[in-house]
């Protein structure tokens, strides 16, 4: 009887370990890079950021990014909340963290993709299904965001231009998206002068906004 009990216990441990292994499976590798799933952000920090979109893990979020990009929605928008060593957030037409597009919110598409440096995710409010147009780019890893925010892409080149985005909550002189396009649009890289870093503001910086719910302002710290 004792042997049977030990055998049953051992089987239970193996079964639990198998379940745990399934829960922590590695995220799927990115598919081959294609022009239609390449998001290009020409920034006022001086150059182009190339982002591989992941419709394989976040099809609705990628569809939203593409639809708004086709409209020219992101052109001229600022990065309104940028925390050094954490993330840069933009995509708000109001520029204060409270705005979005006129399209319905996008449901959550959580996955096992980690929030590493360069990961691009949808910002949201407390409701997990409240993502709309805002997004954030990770400056450094923060794995506590995994399975809480929808990762839909990752920077594959131009991260130095992301690092150069003006920091602040809000920044005194916000960096902006000069132009957003897809690789399939074949939009030429603007001439160097068009992407020159924005000169310092000549007016006093606006007062810092109070912390608001995550997403429309920022993911949790």
Image (tube, rainbow, N blue to C red):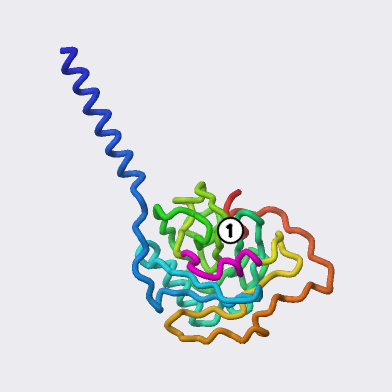
Quarter containing the N terminus: top left
Residue shown at 27% from the left, 38% from the top: 18
Examine the image and state in which quarter residue 81 appears: bottom right
Residue 90 is left or right of residue 22, and the answer is right
Where does residue 91 sit, x and y in percent of width and height?
58, 70
Residue 121 visible somewhere in the drawing: no
Q: Which residue is mark 1?
A: 139
Q: Nearer the viewer, residue 191 or 71?
A: 191
Please give the range of residues in magenta: 154-164
Residue 78 visible somewhere in the drawing: yes
Q: Secondary structure at mark 1?
A: loop
Where does residue 179 sit, x and y in percent of width and height?
58, 80
Residue 158 drawn in magenta: yes
The residue positioned farthest toward the top in the image shown: 2
Where does residue 4 sit, x and y in percent of width and height?
16, 18
Q: Is residue 116 above or below residue 30?
A: above
Residue shown at 57% from the left, 54% from the top: 140
Q: Is residue 72 above or below residue 19?
A: below
């Amino acid at each position: 009887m004792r042997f049977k009990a030990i055998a049953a216990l051992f089987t239970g441990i193996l079964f639990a370990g198998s379940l745990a292994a399934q829960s922590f499976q590695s995220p799927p590798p990115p598919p081959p890079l294609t022009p239609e799933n390449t998001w290009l952000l020409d920034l006022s920090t001086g150059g182009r950021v190339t982002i591989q979109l992941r419709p394989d893990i976040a099809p609705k979020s990628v569809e939203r990014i593409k639809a708004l990009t086709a409209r020219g929605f992101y052109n001229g928008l600022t990065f309104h909340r940028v925390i050094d060593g954490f993330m840069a957030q933009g995509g708000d037409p109001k520029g204060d963290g409270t705005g979005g597009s006129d399209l319905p919110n996008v449901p959550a598409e959580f996955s096992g993709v980690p929030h590493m440096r360069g990961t691009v995710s949808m910002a949201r409010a407390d409701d997990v299904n409240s993502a709309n147009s805002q997004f954030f780019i990770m400056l450094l890893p923060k794995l506590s965001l995994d399975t809480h925010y929808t990762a839909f892409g990752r920077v594959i080149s131009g991260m130095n231009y992301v690092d150069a985005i003006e920091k602040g909550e809000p920044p005194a002189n916000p960096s902006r998206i000069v132009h957003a396009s897809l690789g399939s649009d074949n939009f030429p890289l603007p001439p160097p002068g068009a992407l020159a870093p924005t000169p310092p503001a000549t007016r006093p910086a606006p007062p810092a906004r109070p912390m608001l719910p995550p997403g429309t302002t920022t993911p949790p710290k």
